[in-house]
Image: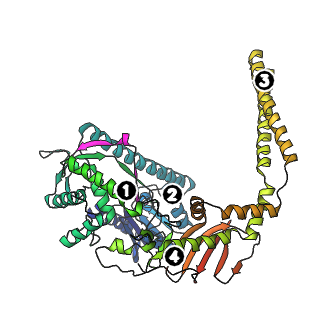
Amino acid sequence: MKKAAIYMRVSTAHQEEEQTIENQKMEILERVQKDGNILLADCEYKDEGWSGAIIERPDLDRMRADAREAKFEVLYVYDRGRLSRKFVHQEIILDELRECGIECISLHDINGQTTEEILMGSVMGIFHEYERVKITERMRIGKVRKVRENKKLLGYQPKYGYDYFPRIKSGPDARDGYFEINKQQAKVVKQVFEWIAAGVSKHEVKRKLFKMGVPPPKGKRDQWSGGTLDRMVRNTTYMGDHYYNKSESVPTKNPRNPEQKYRKITKGSRKRRPKEEWFHVEVPAIVSPDLFHKVQVQLEKNKRVNTRNNSVNKYLVAGLVECACGKARTGDPVSNGSSYYRCTDRLSKYPLARECHEAGINVPVFDALVWRNIKELLLNPNLVVEKAKRRQATSPLQNQLKMLTTKLKKLDDEQHRYDKAYGQGVMSERRYKDVMYELNDKREALVAEVSALEDEMVNQKPVTLEQYLDGTINRVENLSFTEKKAIIRKVVTKIVATKQEVRVWGRIPLLATPEIETINNNENSIFATHLLNERKVGLNVSNWDCWLAKCG
């Protein structure tokens, strides 16, 4: 009798509702009992609603940790696909179990003991993965074909304002899937369109909906967001023109919490497909085309007159500044011509009371302060001298000469192959002469380029370190706003700012000295530490040499 553990997984909420975890468990327990083993109370592992493409799952990690501690001797799974959808992940987990001396028994796969059986099990794992990919693709193609041919909807999450009635394949009630207007939600949709068409701002629409007690579509918040409203009033579905296959799932680019270890899905973002891949499907209209187009005109008008979209207001570090509360700070111009970086908490929470009360920070003062410190860092003599030395060691002319020499070597190799082919009678004399004529022309052109480069290198006056330093200083001092912004985007990764302190995180090339360096002056301190081929910088500024930003 061995100490047994079981691992189960289902990937969707639909599967959870169908109790497939329990179905797996019943079949596995029968096998455990048949083998005469005993299931330990704390060795039942299950991940419900987790994609098999993700190897980082809470109970899978717990099972692997318990295996290393030898808490059980044999692991039972319904099939290898429960461990992972990916073959390489399956092999990683199975190898770990073997190294721990733990047997893995799959109810629907070959459980290998000999080398040949292990190989066959691996081959089956590869075919499982391949078949799953093919099934997924067949289903997608089948849906697209049916929508294209029948102009009907299949398997859909309806837009706010609609209810979706799924397709019934057969029987007396057989039908295609279709949208039906949800009268209560449709009133809200039409009201929002009418407000926007009348010139009401989205900010005010949020307040009106909150006052009316209308919850947002998903109901996860008490108030509507500006993004939800914007997507609604730009969606052609509401005037009866719906498009299928408009977007596809892609890996999440900017997760809200990058440090979160466990994620149930990997493809959390959407990417729009080319318009020629969309399929038009008519649905009941909630608003008239005339009202829809009036709203689009009003949105464009709002965009033109909105001070936030006015190019006069320049924000050097826009998109990089965060508040101490963790939310972003965005540029906010006011009527008197001033502008401030303000915490977005007041916007995201509106019309609820905001939780963060950090004051706004004057944009010109803040931008000047950050740029001055970044500039001092970039003009550090040690950094500039090291860059100059690297440039001298690998000049552009030397790189170009090396490239031309490589091309000449390739021509020689090519000629050798043709000589061999002609000598063996594979190539005719006429063809051989034509090819040699072309090769000689190419060689003469390359030799001329090499000669010109060598002459240029002989006559080139070397740039001294002092000249390089002076030129760098002069260039940095005369950068345009666009150039400064581009440099900051490359150097700075994050800025956290309050009225009392600014902390800037960024990356700069390693200086020549390998040791950790601290540079102090009367205004700020820069703590620099090595990070692979870059330097991670934390810049603490506690004293403002201009005026404090006015309260927002």
Look at the image and tell me whether residue 1 can be seen: no
Instruction: Say whether residue 167 is left or right of residue 52.
Output: left
Mark 2, other Cα within 10 Å: few <14 / some 14–19 / many ≥20: some
Q: Nearer the viewer, mark 2 or mark 1?
A: 1
Kind of residue at badge 1: Arg
Measured Cα–Cα span from mark 2 to mark 1? 68 Å
Task: In this rendered view, identify the residue nearer to me: 401 or 63.
Answer: 401
Q: Residue furthest right?
A: 458
Task: In this rendered view, identify the residue nearer to me: 231 or 20.
Answer: 231
Kind of residue at badge 3: Met
Q: Position of residue 457 (x, y in %)?
A: 84, 46
Label 2 residue SS: loop
Kind of residue at badge 4: Val
Q: Residue at label 4?
A: 496
The part of the image, by quadrant, that contains residue 435 is top right
Residue range (magenta): 266-282
6, above or below 107, in the image: below
Quadrant the N terminus occupies = bottom left
Mark 4 and mark 3 in contact? Answer it, CB < 8 Å: no
Which residue appears at 24% of the width and 38% of the height? 150
Label 4 residue SS: strand
Which residue appears at 56% of the width and 79% of the height? 546
Q: Residue at label 2?
A: 112
Kind of residue at badge 2: Gly
**Which numbered disc flags the more N-terminal residue, 4 or 3?**
3
Measured Cα–Cα span from mark 2 to mark 4? 55 Å
Q: Position of residue 179 (x, y in %)?
A: 19, 50
The part of the image, by quadrant, that contains residue 506 is bottom right
Quadrant the C terminus occupies = bottom left
Q: Residue at label 1?
A: 304
